[in-house]
Amino acid sequence: WLANLALVLVSLLFSLLLLEQGFRIWMFGSQAFDVAALRNNVPVNNAGFMQHSAFADIYWELKPRLDTTFKLAHLTTNSHGLADREYPLQKPVGSYRIAVLGDSYSMASGVDTGKSYHALLEQWLNETTGKPYEVINFAVGGFGLERYNAVLDHKVPAWQPDAILLGYCGFNDHQALPPATGTVPPFNPPRADGFRHSYVREFIDMKMAEKKILQDTSGLVLNEKHLAFIARELQRTRELANRIQPGLPVVLAYLDNRPHSEQDLQAIAAIAQQNGMVFVDTSRQFAGTRIDEYSIQLLDSHPNEKAHALFAQSLSNAIEQQALFGFISRSMTP
């Protein structure tokens, strides 16, 4: 009977391994066999890509000169540790600089760095206007409004921006994220290995979580505490932008690959406008779509390449219609 028990256990283990690999092939296709890529299919803090920032209230930042995979996409950082192409610190004469603030949605987790919405926007601005635009990405995964303001305070001014593009994440930017402002936590996150992770188990956990969320929708609409937090932080954003240049243009791009409550959108738009910001909603175009159609993976709802293209389209439409960022079409110039 011991031999039979061992045979059953070996058969069960082999069946589970087949199930796991079959599930990975269904999700990732040929990348299911890419050990190196799957290892970095983890949260950015656990991928070994981060380091302490020199500024206590920023806490962490991306390491410079990364050229790797992250969530099965190509991630590169420049010599300044920005998830973007290389730019000189000194602004070229005649160029128009836009500093992008944001979290993993703007860092473009799971999307090739060159296919992020801000990279597409930079390309469109240069091609359409014939003028040199630089859309420089300061976004880092795991950040929130407090961290955006810390970056705006300490890092952005040296780049002499002509405008700010705040990539507001509709998923969690309505709340303060740990660590709390004013504390400097130890930064030694464990290095995770996505290749050794069970995606079948994560799928089961996700389905259980979805059921729980459907039963309790109280957290899906912004409450007074959320709105007070947003108002406080956006006021701080305006103050910091004015330090760089009085009346510095700030565009708040509401980013999400899901539709949102009209009440919430109007509330955030009103707060943005009270602080002299232009509000651009990119989430409306996802009404009636399935979240997995615009997510990087079945188990990860970060916006995929198609979603970033739609973000860029919404922003380019707003820029053209409202003449933002000094926009003048090449066809309009004599």
Image (tube, helix red, strand yellow):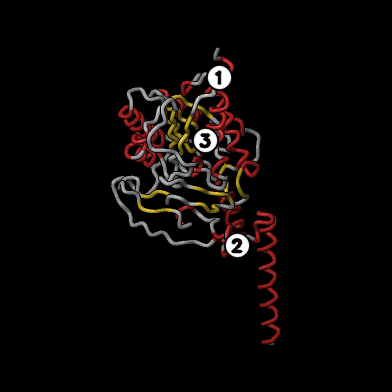
109 vs 192: above or below? above
User: Quadrant where the C terminus lies?
Assistant: top right
The residue furthest top is 334
Relative to 202, residue 222 above or below? above
Q: Quick one: SS at disc 3?
A: helix
* Residue 58 visible in the displayed image: yes
Query: Could you give the CA–CA distance between mark 1 and mark 3, rounded to whole angstroms?
Result: 18 Å
User: Which disc number belongs to residue 18?
Assistant: none
User: Residue 46: image x %, image y %?
Assistant: 46, 57
Is label 1 in a helix, a strand or a loop?
loop
Q: Cβ–Cβ below 8 Å for labels 1 and 3?
A: no
**Amino acid identity at mark 3:** His
- Asked which quadrant contains residue 251, the reply is top left
The type of residue carrying mark 2 is Val
Task: Tell which tag, 1 or 3, sits nearer the viewer.
Answer: 1
Residue under pointer 2: 35
- Is tag 2's residue or tag 3's residue first in the polypeptide sequence? 2
Count neighbours of disc 1 (C-alpha within 10 A) and say few if under 14, some if 14 to 19, many if 20 or more: some
The dot on residue 329 is 1
Outermost left residue: 182
Which residue is tagged 3?
118
Residue at the (69%, 78%) spot, across then down: 8
